[in-house]
Amino acid sequence: MTSAAAPSAAAPQNYLGGIALRLLAMASLSLMFVVVKYIDRAGIHIVESLFWRQALVLPFLLLWVKATGGFASLRTNRIGAHTRRMLMGLTGMACNFGGMILLPMAEATTISLSVPIFAVIFAALLLGEATGWQRWSAVIIGFVGVLVVLDPLASFAGGFGGAHGLGTLVALAGAIMTALITIAVRDLGRTENAATIVFWFSLLSMVPLGIALPFVFTPHSGSEWLLLLALGFLGAIVQMSLTGALRLAPVAVVIPMDYSSLLWAIAAGWWFFGTLPADTTWVGAPLIVASGLFIAWREHRRHIARPKEVAA
């Protein structure tokens, strides 16, 4: 995989625009996960949820493409990279959906905030990015926060059984996959616009999901179809905003905006489901947030210093 850190000449950087899109994505994502939990309570299989989440994105996306750049902008010479992104995306989405279904929203969201920690590790391993002791220290602190939230001693004593133990593992897998997806999307953003990346992700995912759908599909009431429609609509907003943010600004600039999702998750969990974060979440979340913000601050400092070094 080629470096995803350098901005493309074909993709002008707009930090404020990237930040605004990421904030919009986090608010929409929290609402989407509320819908996911209601869909699960209605007895709809997670594979079917994923199918309609992807299928219903396409009409909204095509309308947006027609109104902006035209269908010619969807052409690509990187179908292999889009296919890899699709496989990672479906896996990550299934884990994120599963984590939200099995855990309270705030707890699942806190685990998902470990994405910057894994992103640093993968950037060092896969992209060969230099990672000094300060960022590695932040990674270690973040991992301590993740362990506190996961409460592995209690989970291990129960054999990671039950919905909570399984949910923590699924949510953690989702965070790891999201970190990989972040790097993959940043790489694709060097040559592809946001609409192209989302279009091929949604279209290619119809193949495996379409094959699986007949085995899990059930008839739905009008209210259930409304939930599925809301899932697709919110998914379109989330997908376009996330991808657009990574195209407009570096990962280190937009990732800190993800912490706003914790506030949305706490409020939504309390309002819709009457749940509040566990005690371990209150303790571990500040460590995860502090780690991610420090990583972002270090990246920002490096971004400022780099042009000065080149000029010197």
Image: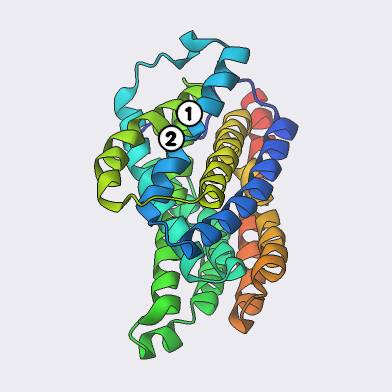
Q: Residue at 57% across / 46% down in the picture? A: 226
The x and y percentages for residue 165 are 41, 78
Location of mark 2 (residue): 55
At a point 54% along the width and 41% down the height, the residue shown is 229
Q: Are marks 2 and 1 in contact (CB under 8 Å)?
A: yes
Location of residue 108 by image quarter = bottom right
* Up-down relation of residue 193 to residue 123 (above or below): above
Q: What is the image's colouring?
A: rainbow
**Label 1 Cα crowd, 10 Å radius (few <14 / some 14-19 / many 20+):** many
Q: Residue at x 56, y 28 (%)?
A: 60
Q: Which residue is mark 1?
A: 58
Residue 64 seen from this side: yes
Do we see residue 128 in this rendering?
no
Position of residue 47 measured from the top left corner of the image (x, y, whole percent): 35, 51
Kindly identify the residue that appears in the image at 57 percent across and 54 percent down: 35
- Element assignment for label 1: helix
The quarter of the rendered structure image containing the C terminus is top right
Q: Whole-Å distance between the Cαs marked 2 and 1? A: 6 Å
Q: Nearer the viewer, residue 261 or 232?
A: 232
For the residue marked with disc 1, what is the amino acid? Leu
From the image, which quarter does the N terminus lie in?
top left
Residue 205 or residue 5, whichever sits in front: 205
**Callout 2 crowding tier (Cα within 10 Å): few <14, some 14–19, many ≥20:** many
Toward the bottom, the furthest residue is 157
Q: Position of residue 210 (x, y in %)?
A: 30, 38
Disc 2 residue type? Answer: Ala
